[in-house]
Image (cartoon, helix red, strand yellow):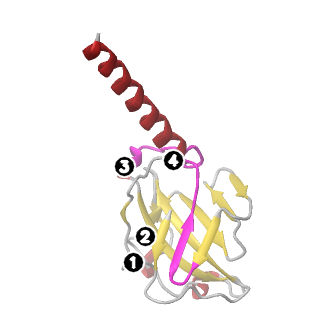
Amino acid sequence: MSGTTDAAIDTPASAFYVWCVDRGTGTARFGALAPGVLFDSVVIFRLHGTATVNRFNGSNNLPAGTATFAGNTIQGSISGALLASTGFDKTAYTWNLWPRDGSQSGNSAISDFAPDNSNVAVTVVPEPSTVALLVLGLGAVGSVTRRRRTA
């Protein structure tokens, strides 16, 4: 997951960022405040680098280094297995990102919903191990093809 904000990432100790994901059964949980923000799971990125994946029927805490913050960019690496489909193909998932102030409660702790109080489509990027296997597989196919041509 990667997102770029308009300004530098806010860094008070109580701040964290919530990435909501609609995997197929998302509902509007903010009512009139943000009716277009639909989700059935969230990934919480904390400034010290840990993350939590919460699917509302169980959660996984992830270690430091899972999330990184640099300037106005947030990045995190989450296994697709932790965000299994609830009806959508992974290429049809949608998301929204919002900063939260953990020192406040309720919706007043949210300063903004990005982008524009609605969800946007996910861009799926293969995990590095998948890309490595694909490259090795293409290399093997190329070797076999080359051997057949020289034989």
From the viewer's side, name the closer residue of 126 and 99.
126
Q: If you read the primary sequence from the N terminus, does the residue marked by circle 3 or circle 4 appear first?
A: 3
Mark 1, residue position: 117
Q: Does the magenta stretch include residue 82?
A: yes
User: Of marks 1 and 4, which one's residue comes earlier in the chain?
Assistant: 1
> Marks 2/4: CA distance?
27 Å
Q: Where is residue 144 in the image (x, y as percent from the top left)?
A: 36, 18
Which of pointers 1 and 4 indicates the residue nearer the eye? 4
- Mark linked to residue 109: none
Query: Which is closer to the viewer, label 3 or label 1?
Result: 3
* Numbered disc 4: secondary structure: loop
Mark 1–mark 2 Cα distance, whole angstroms, equals 6 Å
Residue 74, placed above or below residue 10? above
Tell me if label 1 and label 2 are in contact, CB under 8 Å.
Answer: yes
Residue on which the image places disc 2: 37
Range covered by the magenta-colored residues:
70-91
The residue at 34%/27% (across/down) is 142
Badge 2 density bin: few <14, some 14–19, many ≥20, Cα 10 Å: many
| Residue depth check, mark 2 versus mark 4: number of the one nearer the observer | 4
User: Nearest the camera: 75 or 128?
Assistant: 128
The amino acid sitting under disc 1 is Asn
Quadrant position of residue 93: bottom left
Q: Distance between the residues labelled 3 and 1?
A: 21 Å
User: Tags 1 and 4 in contact by the CB under 8 Å rule?
Assistant: no
Residue on which the image places disc 3: 91
Left or right, residue 16 beside residue 4: right
**What amino acid is found at the position of numbered circle 3 in the picture?**
Thr
The dot on residue 127 is 4
Q: Which residue lies furthest to the top in this view?
A: 151
**Dot 3: what SS?**
helix
